[in-house]
Amino acid sequence: MTTLLIAEHDNNSLKDATNKALTAAAELGAEVHVLVAGENAKGAAEAAAKLKGVTKVLLADNAAYAHDLAEPLAALIVSLAPNYDAFVAPATSRFKNVMPRVAALLDVMQVSEIIKVVSPDTFERPIYAGNAIQTVKSKDAKKVITVRTSTFQATGDGGSASVENAAAVADPGLSSFVGEEVAKSDRPELTSAKIIVSGGRAMQSRENFTKYIEPLADKLGAGVGASRAAVDAGYAPNDWQVGQTGKVVAPELYIAIGISGAIQHLAGMKDSKVIVAINKDEDAPIFQVADYGLVADLYQAVPELIQAL
């Protein structure tokens, strides 16, 4: 039984999600190969070859894989299927698009967002916004798995795998790349940030995010997050959203400001090591998961916190 891990990368280096998904892939108990598909992605392939426990890296370097289009990547993975028993990828937005296609083309069930490997065919995954844990046993000959990376430690370097070229396959041509706008920020990316400061609907405006949340984040070297209510109200951009329909994070420190704590938000951050909540409503659900809670007016408390820092 051999496992193929599909890497999340930017062509030059691997994303942290790949290292964490590798930990889950290794727990399947089989030899692990890594697929790096991209354009001019030799740097990412060399980084994958150094990961502990990886025995082979397949590099598919082709313009068809340059822009994360799901159809050509899914076709590539399926072309490699005869050599593998399991396909593992981090549950990022990219692979939430790719892996269901792979499962459909292989006519198997996908096991989504696993948080624990019980055995090579049995996994645990959260359901009902994380309020229950489902144990899934797959009888399919080939397993297609996505990993909720917030629950796995990252695998470090220590390997010296060989890098082999993987032939590109015909592009199904079902979609084409039009363009992209990349948001530039000096702050750490949410999914890899060690500290996150999030604001909720109580922030009341975009200007208040700029005035209160962002200065605190800058003081702490933190990423900035938001609840869905704040995003829907236009107070924060979509890529800041934390929760069931946003990003799932597990930083060392999560500071929730003016967030009531709906279960959909808690599902995205409750694995954080330390949770601090500031809310003037002492009955807010966020206090049930917070390690430290401050019942206070955020417009008074946050400036005082920034001043103290």
Image (cartoon, rainbow, N blue to C red):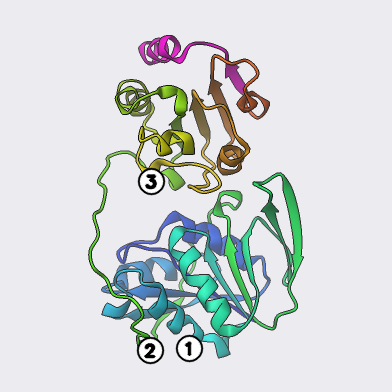
The residue that label 1 is drawn on is 79
Left or right of 91 on screen, residue 59: left
Q: Which residues are magenta?
A: 292-309
Crowd class of label 1 (few under 14; some 14 to 19; many from 20; radius 10 Å): few
Residue nearest the observer in this picture, 271 or 109: 109
Is residue 306 in the magenta section?
yes
Is residue 213 in the magenta section?
no
The residue that label 3 is drawn on is 239
Does label 3 or label 2 sit earlier along the sequence? 2
Q: Quadrant of the C terminus?
A: top left
Majority secondary structure of magenta residues = helix
Residue nearest the observer in this picture, 28 or 160: 28
Assess whether mark 1 and mark 2 are in contact (beta carbons under 8 angstroms): yes
- What residue type is disc 1 on? Ser
The residue that label 2 is drawn on is 169
- What residue type is disc 2 on? Val
Residue at x-position 55% and y-position 24%: 276
Rounded to the nearest angstrom, the CA distance separating label 2 from label 1 is 7 Å
Crowd class of label 3 (few under 14; some 14 to 19; many from 20; radius 10 Å): some
Residue 102 position within the rendered picture, expressed as x and y whole percent measured from the top left: 53, 78
Left or right of 121 on screen, residue 208: left
Helix, strand or loop at mark 2:
loop
Residue 201 position within the rendered picture, expressed as x and y whole percent measured from the top left: 46, 28
